[in-house]
Image (spheres, rainbow, N blue to C red):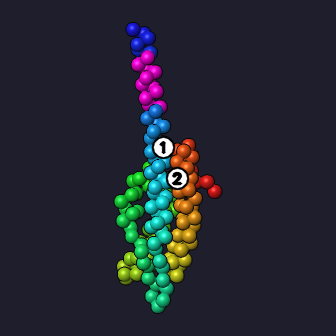
Amino acid sequence: MMSELLAGFVGAVLALLGQGVWDRFRKASIARGLAIAYWEELSAVRIKTVDVPQIGGFSSQTYDTLFRELAEVMPDSLMRDLMRYHWRMKLLDASQEGRGGVSWVTGLQEAEELRDDLLARLNRYADREISDLAVNRREKV
């Protein structure tokens, strides 16, 4: 009786450990895929300043639909800066349509700096092996 109880307990512990390892690899895979998706999203954005500044290619759909996954699997530093960029662009987009009150010069400069920084960081993150991300999801500098 005692050996059966011990075997059941050991089996349950092993199952939980296996599930935890599986979950870390699954989240690492999702994080890598998100890094690629956000890199592609940022790469599509074009900001032109002719007479009136215009934003092309920005879509908030990726950010809005994948926010939960972003919050669950990405490092806090990357998630925070992606959302900062997202809200900066939404504000600029609204301002472009006459609904915001943001300075275009300051807003564009900040958005372009964030975009360039995020492109490099997302590229580095996406280039990491899934096993590396499963062990350490933080950004490597």
Is residue 15 covered in magenta? yes
Residue that numbered label 2 is attached to: 75
| Residue at the (56%, 53%) spot, across then down | 128
Residue 71 visible from this viewpoint: no
Write down the region rendered in magenta.
Answer: 7-17
**Badge 1 element:** helix
Mark 2 or mark 1: whose residue is earlier in sequence = 1
Q: Residue furthest right?
A: 141
Residue 81 picture location, percent across and down: 51, 62
Residue 7 visible from this viewpoint: yes
| Residue at the (39%, 58%) spot, across then down | 66
Q: Given the image, on which type of amino acid does mark 1 rest?
A: Phe
Rendered position, 122 above or below 51: above
Write down the quadrant of residue 26 in the picture: top left
**Badge 2 element:** loop
Q: Given the image, on which type of amino acid does mark 2 rest?
A: Pro
Q: Which quadrant holds the N terminus? A: top left
Q: Nearer the viewer, residue 127 or 84?
A: 127
Q: Residue furthest top?
A: 1
Is residue 75 covered in magenta? no
Main SS of the magenta segment? helix
Q: Nearer the viewer, residue 71 or 95?
A: 71
| Residue at the (43%, 23%) spot, across then down | 11
Residue 59 picture location, percent across and down: 39, 70
Write down the quadrant of residue 7 in the picture: top left
Residue that numbered label 1 is attached to: 25
| Residue at the (46%, 66%) spot, across then down | 40
Dot 1, how many residues are within 10 Å of its Cα: few (below 14), some (14-19), or many (20+)? some
Decide if residue 4 is on the left or right side of residue 119: left
Q: CA distance from mark 2 to mark 1?
A: 15 Å
Query: In this rendering, which labeled residue sits more in front, label 2 or label 1?
Result: 1
